[in-house]
Structure formats: structure tokens, C-alpha cells
Image (cartoon, helix red, strand yellow):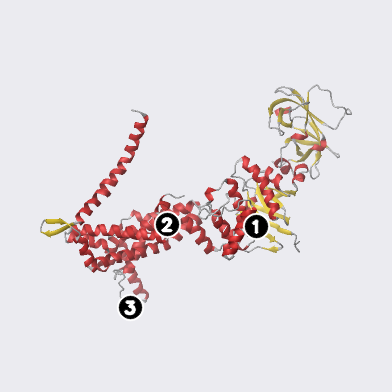
Amino acid sequence: MTSDSTNDLECERLTKRFGAFTAVDDVSFEIPSGSFFSILGPSGCGKTTLMRMIAGFEEPAAGDIRIRGRSVIGTPANKRNVKMVFQHLALFPMMNVGENIAYGLRCAGVGRAEVERRVGAVLERIGLPGVETKQINQLSGGQKQRIAIARCMVLEPDVLLLDEPLGALDLKLRERMKIELKLLQHQFDTTFVYITHDQSEALVMSDRVAVMNGGRFEQIGTPQELYHAPATGFVAGFVGDSNRWRGRVRGGGELLEVETGDGVRLRCRPGAGALAEGAAVEVFVRPEALSLQPAGAPEAEGPANSPANRLEGRVDSLLFNGAASRVLVRGAGDQLVEVGHVPGPGVPELRPGDAVVLGFAPAEATCFAAASA
Amino acid sequence: MSKRDADRLALFLLLAPFALWILLLIVLPHLGIGYLSLREKVAPRVYQFGFANYIDFIREPIYWNTLLRTAWMSVLVTVLTLFIGFPIAYYIAKVAGRRSRAALFLLCLVPLWVSDLVRAFGWIMLLRETGILSGLLQWSGLSAGPVEMLYNDATVIVGLIYTVVLFMIVPIVSTLDGMDDSLIEAGYNLGGGRLTVLRRIVVPYAMPGIVAGCIIVFMLTAGSYLTPILLGGKNSMWFTEQIYDQFITRYNWESGSTFGILLLVFTSLVVWAGLRLTGQNLANTVAKR
């Protein structure tokens, strides 16, 4: 197989087993040069193992890893031009900032004057000039983050791996670091591979995201594709917020008719694969795709058997969160439905207990075969 | 009684046993020894203040040679113990799995169940002319006659290392235990080889433990009595033996006290010099950053 030289990192049918447990199962992907690629998955899905194989800390049981077109299987970790930002950053506490950054250069045998120049230059680039002599424990969380990235970037790696480096930061700083990371990636123009379980981190920063579950990739795509056209039920449920109904297929056609366990009939778009009549399915609808009307309000005009889905319920509670405010509606069978609802002028005011009607277009509802349970 | 008074009383009561221990078992005896060492014997039962005991020590080469020899051998034992103990500690703290770690640690402690004396006799059984090792060498034909392996410096050093190695392992294990494995991985990831990672990351991290271990081992060795006497016999020339001689055999308490003070001062000097040479300080070792 010939490898395309515009890909910084390619993995082909990568597999890793620990005893009888398969942590990474036949994973293939490629990352074009200079892009921000995220691997998103719940904890224990194998994403850390995958990254440790790329870094060279674990040997794959099968498959190939190519960096800039060259296989690195059998190359020890310290000889791969893949650098890693660890979850807890792993800055060396017994060295000061300058020594931390110089460590890799000194290992590579760069001369003293050159080391000093390059350390100064990389600190300039991350916006922390002149901190060489500071101790690590004198830095703030965000500064440590940037030093950890600088320590890798000074070595001009082909690929930078980041293992949930924002996990230890508080919320406010995390939001700021997301933007900063994206800017740093643009500035260095290096391929970043970012591992996370936080879907908002992955969606905000990435050019492309791979959603991983149970050791396999469920879908690789742009954040928009994952959000609007999930390929599997897992992706639909994991990326972004979703309302979910379980049911069985009752009628086919271009749009499927699904009867939920509570007897409500919904019309929806099949997500992937053919679904036979009677198949158990799950229907996913984004909260912002649901429209909300007080019960008894004049019905939006349409033919008698409008394809729009209608659900009746009562307001259970109001969750105010600025532009991301939600209303919880208790529908048939006591199921709570999350509805995007931003209070404001011209929007009917709601109170808990109000009877409401929810509606959504069939195109906004995606159904997938239910996970075998 | 106000709350502050109560707090003070609690603090006082908590500190009392410690203060008593320091005062009664450490400060007072040393004051006594210091006082004794400064008494010159001018006639039977007649004493006067003076430094004659110290001058005697300097005038008699056998005395200060023994002290120098003791210090030098103790330094050697300390260095060898570090080289033996560090890999063991590293293995226990970083390589061994969770479950085997406890078992290995326990194995290190097992020899402490047996008294020093019995352990020294164990070595004698192994190494004496009619001992197990000598017998084995003769049986296998490697040696024509019985071999005496006791009563030389090498045996004393081996015996001392055996008694003190645990005190090197424990502090190093406890510092390495607190080390995040990802520091080592980061060391490799940034391009370091095994040696670089060991020299620039693992050893500097473990330094407080290494220093603590070295001080304990050096002091224990320099002050040990049983092992050098039993394994080294008359040739051991250990300084504690001189102190024992002065106090017990020659009943010269003044001279014995002088030797005691000199041993304390000299070993303290060696520790201080060692800390200076390696650029460490005691505060760093005791209160880790």
C-alpha cells in the first residue's frame, strides 16, 4: 500500500489486546498535515491505549502506524518524532521552566547557545517571554499548560498528542484554553491529535473528530457532520444533547413510522442501514429542533395528515441557562423531553404545569437500530 | 480556663514526651559525656579541667587512624548500599505490580525479625573455615583446603551492607512512590534514553530519599558495633570497639567520653561535607517541596 505524503499520521487496522480484553479493535484512520484531529469517547473506550500506541508506550498486537509515511512499529518511544502533552502535564518539578523546555533539545544533542536561543524563541511564541528561571510551582494552571505544549513544540514534532490536558483545569480556564489551544495549533501549524471525553472540547477545536466506543471508531467526520448526520445511534446520543425514544418500526417508506412503547407514533428519517418492520429502534431528536406551543393555541396550518410529529405534555420545569435555556416537558409515559426554549419578547411565558404541544419535522428525527440489549 | 489556655496545655502535653526524650536520653547524656571528656586525671581520684584527653587522641596514631578508617569504610558501605538499594527500591516502587509490591516490601523487612547478633552468627556459619561455603568449595574441587572467609574487611563490608540496606530502600521507595509514572514516560517521549531519564529525572526526583537513606546508613554503620566485631574479629579496628575498650576494659571513662564526642563530631562533619559536595541541604530532605 502506498502512503500519501500529505498525511502526517496514518493508522491501519490497529489492534491491541490486554489478555482477553480487546482495548483497540481494528482501527484505521489518517490525519492530513496541519489539522486538528480529536478522538472522542467515553472513559474506557480505548482512546488512551490508542494514543499510547502512537507514542510508542504500547506495542500494537496487529496493524501499522505510519508517521509521515514511515512505519514506526518497532521504533522505541524516544526515537519517534511524536510528542505528547500528558493528562497531568508531567512537567519535571526538579527543573525550572527553561530546563524543562531545554530537556528535549539537550537529549537531541543541540549546542548550549542554540538551546538557549530556541527556548527563548518558543517562550516568545506562546506569549510567556522571560520565564525561563521560574520554578514550575510558581506558574498558574494555564501557564503550565502552555509550557507543557512549548516543551513539545520546541522539538518540532510531526504530530503532537494531547491526552485530555484540560481535564484538571477549572471551567472558566478550560473555556479559555480551548480557544488558546486552537490558536496555538494554527500558529505552529502542526498536526494535533487531541484525546477527550468532553464532546464540547472536541466539537469546538477540531477539524475532524473520531468518535470511539468499545475499542472501535463509530464515525469520523467534521464536527458538523457528527452533529447533524450521526452515523450510529451511539454518535447521536454521545455528541450533543438528544432526546431519545425507544420504539418499533410500524411502517416503511422514505420515512419510517415508529411506534414508541407508550403508543405514540412518530415519523422519522432512517439514520443508517435498512430497518425491517418490527425492528427495535431508537429515535433521536435534538432539543433545539423541537417547537413548543401552549396547548389549544391555533394550530400551524397544514394538511390534515401533516407529516409533522406532535406530542402532548406538561411543563415539568424550566432550566434557565441564557441562550442554552431548556424546558423539561413530561410527555406520554412520564418521559421527560428536553426542549430548547429561550425566554424573551414574543415567546409565550411558561410555568410548570402548563399543558403544551411539542412538534418536530420528520427530517429532524433520526432513528437507529436499538443497541442489542 | 480560656480556649487558648486549653490549646496551649494540649500542645504542651503533646510535646512533653518528645521533649523528655530529647532532654533525658540525648541532651543530658551528651552533656555528661562532654563534661567527662574535659576532665584530666592528674593523680588518682584527682581531676582538673583541660584538653589532655583530646591531645592524647591526636598523639596516638592508632586512635585517629581507627577513626579515619571507620569513617572511610562507612562511606564505602554507604555508597555500595546506595548502588545495591536503589535498583531494588526502583523495582519495588515503579516496576512491580500493586500486589507484589507489598510482598516485596515485607520480604525486605523479614530480616529485622531476627536480632543483629543471630544474623551475624548466620554469616559466621556460612563463611568460617569449617563453614558451608568453604565446604562447598572443597566438595566441588574449586579449593584444595579449607578457606577462611571471616576476619577481613570485605566480609565486614558485606555484613554491614546486609544489616543496613533496608534503611536505604525504605526512604527511596517512599519518595519514588510519590512520583507520577508519566514523568518517566515524558522523559522518554521527549527523546531521552534510559540513562538520561535515570540521571536527569528519576535520580533528581528521588534525591531527598537518597540523601535521607545515605545519612541513616552512614550513621548506623559508623556507630555499629556487633557486626564489625563478630565478622572482622581483631582486625576490624572499628572505632566503637575503642570506645568500648576505654569504658569497659580500661575503665577510663574520660578517654571513652572523648572518643564518643569525637565520633559524633567527626561523623557529623562527614555528613555535612557530603551534603555540601552533592549540593543538597537537610531542610530539602526533611521537608520535601
Give the Cα separation between the discs numbered 2 and 3: 51 Å
Q: Residue at x 67, y 53 (%)?
A: A193
Q: Do the residues labelled 1 and 3 touch (CB within 8 Å)?
A: no
Q: Which residue is drawn at 33% across and 28% down?
A: B1
Q: Position of residue A233 (x, y in %)?
A: 73, 42
Q: Is mark 3 on a helix, strand or loop?
A: loop
Q: Which residue is drawn at 45% across and 59% down?
A: B88
Decide if residue A270 is in sight here: yes
Name which quarter of the figure residue B39 lies in. bottom left
Q: Do the residues labelled 2 and 1 touch (CB within 8 Å)?
A: no
Q: Position of residue A222 (x, y in %)?
A: 75, 48
Q: In this view, does A218 lie to the left or right of B246?
A: right
Q: Is residue A282 left or right of residue B85?
A: right
Q: Is residue A304 left or right of residue A349?
A: right
Which mark identifies residue B280? 2
Which mark identifies residue B144? 3
Check disc 1 and report the residue beneath it: A54
Name which quarter of the figure residue A58 lies in. bottom right
Q: Which of marks 2 and 3 is nearer the N terminus?
A: 3
Q: Which residue lies furthest to the right in this view?
A: A303
Q: What is the chain letter for disc 3?
A: B
Q: What residue type is labelled 3?
A: Ala
Of residues B82 and A15, the one nearer the viewer is B82
Give the Cα separation between the discs numbered 1 and 3: 61 Å
Q: Is mark 2 on a helix, strand or loop?
A: loop
Decide if residue B185 is in sight here: no
Q: Residues within 10 Å of mark 3 (few under 14, many from 20)?
A: few
Q: What residue type is labelled 2?
A: Gln
Q: Where is residue A337 in the image (x, y as percent from the top left)?
A: 72, 31
Q: Which residue is drawn at 30% across and 57% down?
A: B116
Q: Nearer the viewer, mark 2 or mark 3?
A: 2
